Image: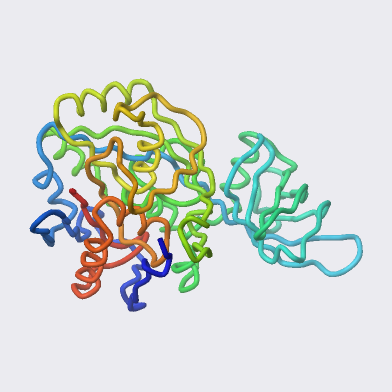
Amino acid sequence: MRVDLFDFELPPERIALRPVSPRDAARLLVVRPGAEPELTDAQIRDLPDLLNPGDALVVNDTRVVPARLNGMRRREIGEGVRVEAMLHKRVATDTWLALARPAKRLAVGDRIHFGGEGDACLLGTLDATVEEKGEAGEIRLRFDFAGPTLDEAIATVGHMPLPPYIAAKRPDDAKDRTDYQTMFAHEEGSVAAPTAGLHFTPELVVRLAARGIATHRVTLHVGAGTFLPVKADDTSGHRMHAEWGEVSLETTAALNAVKAAGRRIVSVGSTATRLLESAAAEDGRLKAWRGETDIFITPGYRFRFIDGMLTNFHLPRSTLVMLVAALIGHEEQKRAYAHAIASGYRFYSYGDACLLLP
């Protein structure tokens, strides 16, 4: 399909720069496509009443790494150059792939010092060597630390990787360290939050459980590719960045039992959706799964496993809005987004959500 079919105009004031408090006070647009499509305005805290006993929610328990590093390229000759590196994939205990700016000022062998004096770890420094340069600003960084020591250093000097549409309007701060993590965050490895999960609170999960709606966990580490625009004119020309995920044997058995009982699987976010669909077999049964997925879901895709999705409102021309259109239909996606814009819903990572129940 043509990518421009997924474009729309969004007033800048609709972009949320902070989440609402409490988290489950966010607005929720319920979308029920069909012969007589229905749009209902609600709130996240209404979720227990919008689902049925026996339904299951699937959340992504990845934890966001403070993956945006500011540093200085240093050479024996010449002045230093300020560099920003967005880590997006760990490839060894001491090595990350990163998107760098300005990448054109970097060369293989360059040394980059991240953080200020005394900012990093016990040794007061976090240095890395550029080992490789790839396309579109990607570099391979080998740090002088490894393992838990490197993790500690990154946590100390790194900044939360807020999406560009927020970072362009305000700097990250201490509040983002908690605001940009879901209550389920456990397995460290993402450089972007699975934002649909940001709306949940412990109280909401208790209320869901009391109604007989279980919450199950999977892990998909979101990469920086989630921020990259689709530059191709047609969806067939776009290549997704691979992301690592895992669905445990225990979760697989529990979710297959839900399906066998005729109940619904509702994924929380596009990341959980993509992982479940990657792990589902052709016959619709889920299998234990561990590895990388680059699944690209666009209109025409036949969903194998999920029956609904809770997700935020996404960027124009993004792979995420294409996924929404694939689940509920392109015309219904456009109608839902037009309603959300006209009704003052807040968009993107810190914004409101929609519950899609095809």
Return the x and y of residue 224 as percentages of the image width and height.
53, 53
Tally the marks: 0
Q: Which residue does the image show at 16% across and 51% down from the upper left?
A: 45
Q: Residue furthest right?
A: 77
Seen in the picture, residue 20 relative to 269 is either above or below; the reply is: below
**Left/right of residue 150 with respect to residue 262 in the rendered view:** right
Return the x and y of residue 231 as percentages of the image width and height.
53, 65
Q: Nearer the viewer, residue 250 or 122?
A: 250
Q: Which residue does the image show at 25% across and 56% down from the upper left?
A: 329
Q: Nearer the viewer, residue 151 or 27?
A: 27
Seen in the picture, residue 171 relative to 222 is either above or below; the reply is: below
**Left/right of residue 216 with respect to residue 150 in the rendered view:** left
Return the x and y of residue 100 as percentages of the image width and height.
66, 59
Return the x and y of residue 115 as percentages of the image width and height.
67, 57
Q: Quadrant of the N terminus?
A: bottom left
Q: Which residue does the image show at 26% across and 24% down from the upper left?
A: 254
Q: Nearer the viewer, residue 309 or 162?
A: 309
Q: Which residue does the image show at 34% across and 76% down from the upper left?
A: 9
Seen in the picture, residue 283 relative to 356 is either above or below; the reply is: above
The colour scheme of the drawn protein is: rainbow
